Image (cartoon, grey):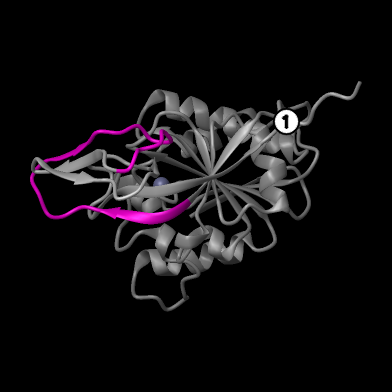
Amino acid sequence: MRVAQLGSGTPEIAVVAGIHGDEPCGVRAVERLLDDRPTVKRPVKLVVANEAALERQVRFIDEDLNRAFPGTPDAKTHEGQLANELVAELEGCLTFSMHSTQSHADPFAIVNGVSETAKDIVPQLPVTAMVETSNFAEGRLFSAIDTVEVECGLQGSETAAENADRLTRAFLTAVDALPGDTVRRELPVYRLVDVIRKGQADTYEVFVENFTEVDAGAPFAAADGDEQIADESFYPVLMSPNGYQDVFGYAAEKLEVLETPTAAD
Ligand SMILES: [Zn+2]
C-alpha cells in the first residue's frame, strides 16, 4: 500500500485507488494529483491500495479485497491483511474509492445507503446514476469506512482514466478541499435487490443495457444460448457477459430521482 498526502494536518478526506489490481484508472488520477500537487484547503490522504495486484495486473492476489473488509492482522490472505491496514489508514476519513468495470462506460456512483452525505456529494460528481448497495455491503470497503465508490468507465480504457481524474477533482471540490464550484445535477437512484447468477458455460451473452428497464417476460441474457427470462421487471446494473465469474450482474429497483435545487426567484 502506498500512502501520500496533499496539504498538512490530519486528513478527514481520502482518495483511494487500486482496490482492484486490474483497474488502473484510479491510480492514474492519484499519480496526476501527486505530480500536480494542487494547493488544498483541507489535507487529503491519497492511497494506492493493492500494489502487489496492480503490479501483476490482476484483480487480487488471494481474494477480492472489496469483499475482505474489515480484515484482520493475522489473516491468511494478502487481501485480508491489507483490508485491516487500509481500515486503520482510513479511519475517520470520508473516502472516495475508484473502480472500473466491463459493463458500463458512463461513470456512476455506488453508496452504502442513501445518507445525507451521499445525497450532498454524489449529485456534484459527473456521474449518471447513484446505486445503493446496502443489501450487498458485506466485506466491502464502505462496510468499514464512510465511502463513496465510483465506477469510472471501462476497465483499462483511456476514457476511464480521464473520468477518474475529473471525478476525483469534482469530489475534492465538493468537499471543499479544492477551490471552485461544482455543478449539481439531477440524479436517478437505484437499489440493488438481487444477484443475477450464471451457470457454467463456454459463451455468455447479455441482451440488455445497464440502467434501462427490462420488462417481465423479456430475455435478458444467455449461457451457451440458453436464455434467461425476467420473472418481473428490473433495472440491470453492472451486467456484462464476462465481468464476473459466477454472476452476470445485479437486478436493481429505481428508488427516486434527486432533483437539482430550483433557483430562487
Ligand atoms: Zn473494482
- Left or right of residue 146, residue 250 in this image: left
In magenta stretch: residue 252: no
Q: Going 25% across and 39% down the picture, which residue do you hit?
A: 220
> Could you tell me which residue is drawn at 56 percent across and 56 percent down?
112
Write the start and end of the magenta stretch as one range: 192-216
Residue 64, image x, y percentages? 35, 59
The residue closer to the viewer here, 119 or 166, is: 119
Q: Is residue 97 above or below residue 76?
A: above
Decide which of 52, 92 is in the foreground and name it: 92
Most foreground residue, 198 or 15: 198
Which residue is rendered at x = 58% and y = 27% of the image?
166
Q: Residue placed farthest to the bottom in the image?
A: 74
Residue 205 seen by the camera: yes
Q: Is residue 261 left or right of residue 140?
A: right
Q: Which residue is mark 1?
A: 260
Q: Residue furthest top?
A: 265
Q: Residue furthest right?
A: 265
Packing grade of label 1 (10 A; few <14, some 14-19, many >=20) is few
Residue 103, how many percent across, how many down?
34, 36
Q: Which quadrant of the rendered structure holds the C terminus? A: top right
Does the magenta run of residues contain 210? yes
* Type of amino acid at the residue the image marks with label 1: Thr
Total of numbered circles in the picture?
1
Q: Nearer the viewer, residue 254 or 123?
A: 254
Predominant secondary structure, magenta span: loop
Q: Is 5 left or right of 156, judged from the image as shown?
A: right
